[in-house]
């Protein structure tokens, strides 16, 4: 294995990239980082302090305080935090701080699995394996709606679908590190694919890379 074997997983909101990352990490015994949680942590800090989401100096200060060991998915998975994080992630100063943190995590031997929106293109362009996981907006909205329902909360499907469209446009259209597949990424469209099928496909690709 390489000194630091890095797997990069990119894709839009609710595409299944996080679930895939966690499954691969469990199978391969590698640490996993959902980089979206780092942006959500910044957004959560701003919302908690009642700060403006477009206040870049305050957001940068919050980014410098992010502790990867204290990212609480149960708190940070809130839908409103996700929408706020998409705005925070458009700030170059915030991205600079968090990308450095993410790289340190990835480059620590024996390596890691990172999922996000710019892992294969910006954070870890030299990753041993890169995936771009996607699904139709309708399927992604359905998954997000199901997640919210399972938590016992109410949600409107059309509102979620509209929010996903806005976040996609923001993530793909931003000037700094837009969401797009790396040129050498393996494409996984999970619109008609369950997580087990996606996991097995990804695992085959990873195992080939580890032995080559």
Image: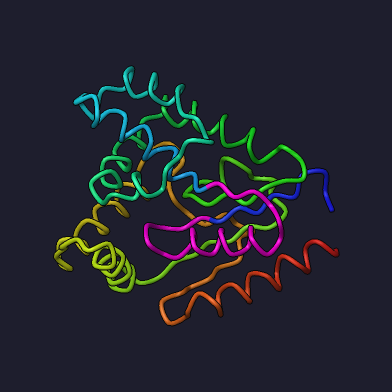
Left or right of residue 90: residue 161: left
Which quarter of the figure has residue 87? top left
Residue 92, image x, y percentages: 41, 29
User: In percent of the image, x 46 and y 58: which residue is there?
Assistant: 11
> Quarter holding the C terminus?
bottom right
Query: Above or below — where is 117 with respect to 12?
Result: above
Q: Position of residue 171 (x, y in %)?
A: 36, 48
- Residue at point 42% right, 64% down? 15
In magenta segment, residue 22: yes
Tag count in the figure?
0
Compared across the picture, whether 111 is left or right of 84 comes to right
Q: With 212 as the anchor, is 140 left or right in this view?
A: left
State the colouring used for the structure image: rainbow
Task: Tell me which corner region of the image, top left, top right, bottom left or bottom right, holds residue 75.
Answer: top left
Q: Is residue 18 above or below residue 170?
A: below
Between 187 and 86, the one lying in front of the other is: 86
Identify which residue, 85 or 132, lies in the foreground.
85
- Magenta residues, as a range? 10-33
Which residue corresponds to the image point at 41% horizontal and 28% vertical from the top-left?
Answer: 94
Task: Specify whether 82 is left or right of 181.
Answer: left
Q: Position of residue 19 (x, y in %)?
A: 49, 63
Q: In the image, residue 111 lies at what x, y percent?
A: 72, 46
Question: Residue sitting at 58 percent across and 61 percent down?
Answer: 131
As drawn, 57 above or below 47? above
Any magenta on residue 184? no
């Amino acid at each position: 294995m390489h000194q630091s074997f890095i797997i990069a997983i990119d894709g839009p909101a609710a595409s299944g990239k996080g679930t895939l990352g966690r499954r691969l990490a469990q199978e391969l015994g590698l640490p996993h980082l959902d980089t979206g949680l780092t942006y959500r942590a910044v957004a959560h800090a701003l919302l908690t302090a009642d700060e403006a989401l477009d206040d870049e100096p305050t957001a940068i200060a919050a980014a410098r305080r992010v502790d990867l060991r204290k990212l609480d998915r149960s708190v940070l998975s809130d839908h409103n935090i996700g929408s706020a994080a998409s705005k925070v992630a458009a700030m170059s100063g915030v991205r600079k701080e968090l990308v450095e943190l993410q790289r340190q995590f990835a480059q620590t031997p024996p390596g890691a699995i990172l999922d996000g929106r710019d892992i294969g293109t910006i954070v870890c362009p030299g990753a041993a394996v890169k995936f771009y996981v996607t699904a139709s907006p309708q399927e992604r909205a359905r998954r997000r709606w199901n997640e919210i329902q399972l938590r016992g909360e109410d949600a409107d499907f059309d509102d979620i679908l509209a929010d996903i469209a806005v976040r996609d446009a923001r993530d793909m259209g931003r000037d700094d590190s837009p969401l797009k597949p790396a040129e050498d990424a393996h494409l996984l469209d999970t619109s008609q694919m369950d997580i087990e099928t996606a996991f097995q496909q990804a695992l085959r690709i990873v195992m080939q890379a580890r032995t080559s």
